[in-house]
Amino acid sequence: MSTFLRPWHALACVAASAAALVVAFVMAPAPLASTRATTDLASEGQLIATFRSAFVGYWHAGNAGFDSDLQRIVDYWFRYHVAKAVLGGALLAVFIVLAVLSWQAFLRVGGLRAAGLAVSGVLATALAVVSLATVMANIHGMAAPFGSLLPMLFGAPSASGGPLPGTLDQIRQQLATGQHSPALAVITDDYVKFHAVMAVEGTIVVIVLVVLTVLLWRGFRRTDRAERRSRRLQAAYGVFVPLLALALAVIVLANATTAAHPLPGLEGFFAGGW
């Protein structure tokens, strides 16, 4: 009996760890990123309002370097992405373990238990993919924290009042005429870095997924034909993983193209097309 219960106990422990990490992923990054100088930024609404105000001041100062107001926001946002990336990485690891344990148990039992474990395996796999996307998003957020703040210039709360619309109009005009100020050069550099990092990390993940696909199909060929459930599972992942790699390769190509030719993307971005 104790031998039978061990895998279920392991599954329960991993699932509980995943639940705790999900709560930490949502709740912990802002407190972890905060310092005495940035406690006001823990509120999303306050962060957006403060960034918009600091951005307007930065733009009109006309300098490449950030002033103290903008620098503290960029530093906070970097630390926020570090916390998110670490917690997302932990979630990715836990969901992979949960998927592996679910499928291992699935291969040993039948009936309703097998159906429940199959659901657990599929759900854990889907959540692992979401966690991977989260880790990747936060890595390029870490690499270009200023660039990843720029979407806050648009959307809710309303960005139609105050000096911000006029500032955005000036940016659009400079992009259209090709007369780039030092501030716009910094914006462009971070925009390029943001997409270039995504292209690089995406390429690495695609390579890993291709290697995993090869290993899955090798395992499929070496598995005895009598082990039908195991072969079906390997074949299912052998199809899913390369499809995931293909989808990611498209994203990599789009980001590499944007990094190589940033002007159309920047024009679309500041036209509200983020």
Image (spheres, grey):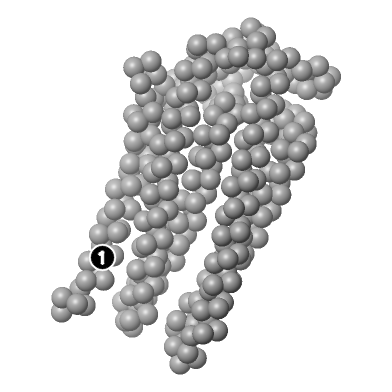
Please identify the quarter of the rendering in which residue 239 is found. Answer: bottom right
**Residue 238 located left or right of residue 8:** right
**Residue 178 located left or right of residue 53:** right
Please identify the quarter of the rendering in which residue 41 is found. Answer: top left
Residue under the image location 36 percent in, 56 percent down: 94
Look at the image and tell me whether residue 40 can be seen. Answer: no
- Residue 66, relative to residue 268: is it above or below? above
Please identify the quarter of the rendering in which residue 195 is found. Answer: top right
Percent across and percent down for residue 220 are 53, 81
Residue under the image location 28 percent in, 65 percent down: 11
- Residue 54, relative to residue 13: is it above or below? above
Look at the image and tell me whether residue 203 can be seen. Answer: yes
Quarter of the figure that contains the N terminus: bottom left
Task: Say which residue label 1 marks.
Answer: 10
Q: Is residue 124 or residue 195 the one in the foreground?
A: 195
Quarter of the figure that contains the C terminus: top right
Percent across and percent down for residue 48 are 50, 22
**Residue 59 located left or right of residue 93:** right
